[in-house]
Amino acid sequence: LVWEPGRLGAKSQTEQKKFQALWKLPAFPRGGLFGLVNNAGVAGIIGPTPWLTRDDFHRVLNVNTLGPIGVTLALLPLLQQARGRVINVTSVLGRLAANGGGYCVSKFGLEAFSDSLRRDVASFGVRVSIVEPGFFQTPVTNLKSLENALQACWARLPPATQAHYGEAFLTKYLKVQQRIMNLLCDPDLTKVSKCLEHALTARHPRTRYSPGWDAKLLWLPASYLPASLVDAMLTWVLPKPAHAIY
């Protein structure tokens, strides 16, 4: 079973109970459910944290974190029955918060849920794997969507906040975002699907998979560096606000 974004994340408790009841129908195989792939992912607004609202975070967390948690908990009895497997697709940005917005927060949360779940269900024969892709060409990394979201966010900011950052900041931020996406995004999604296949079918699935050259050579190594060094590197890459004091 593969769960995609928007199916359960923001639904009410009543709807979640209906979803759970669906998988108790007699038509479902008596052996339970062997595999669940949580592939939820929306980007939301990728931008400076002071520009965002609580609702901006809620929208991303509901899909990327709470959705997979809800689906997994609903289907856990069937997975235990089959001694099955849970594969949660997070992101390499669940290991290093390289930008503001709800995306990194949501993926860090799903990483933590996956780690605790893996330990809690191991005694019942259920295996939990995490797939942490680098940057790939998907709707989540679509430049036009990311730019439109950030420009709409800028347009709603109070004039005082816009003045603190300046129009030049927005222009430079979008250019940096464009360069990063064009440089890092890999069109070969089979690198991810092969990890999913291995996690589902291998006799000894890995705890973590990190498809993508940038995940292996850039983001994961950077996640082990001192935070002060990573801060300095990211500050150097991103533009400075017009009224920055440092």
Image: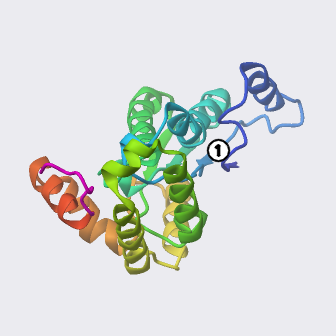
Q: Element under label 1?
A: loop
Q: Position of residue 82 (x, y in %)?
A: 64, 37
User: How many marks can you see?
Assistant: 1
Q: How is the rendered protein coloured? A: rainbow
Where's residue 202, x and y in %? 49, 58
Q: In the rendering, at what x and y percent does residue 83 appear? A: 58, 37
The magenta stretch spans which residues? 239-246
Residue carrying label 1: 34
Nearest the camera: 111 or 209? 111
Front in this rendered view, residue 174 or 197: 174
The image shows residue 182, relative to residue 139, as above or below, that is below
Instruction: Using the rendered image of the protein, determine whether residue 97 is visible from the camera's viewpoint.
Output: no
Report if residue 85 is visible in the image: yes
Asked if residue 171 lies in the magenta stretch, the reply is: no
Locate residue 220 relative to residue 54 in the image: left or right: left
Q: Is residue 46 above or below residue 32?
A: below
- Magenta stretch: includes residue 241: yes
Residue at x-position 16% and y-position 55% = 230
x and y, in percent, of residue 224 in the image: 16, 53
- Tell whether 39 sits left or right of 112: right
Q: Amino acid at mark 1?
A: Phe
Q: Nearer the viewer, residue 95 or 19?
A: 95
Q: Mark 1: few, some, or many residues within 10 Å (few <14, many ≥20)?
A: some
- 45 sits to left or right of 38: left
Q: Is residue 200 left or right of residue 29?
A: left
Q: Main secondary structure of the magenta part?
A: loop
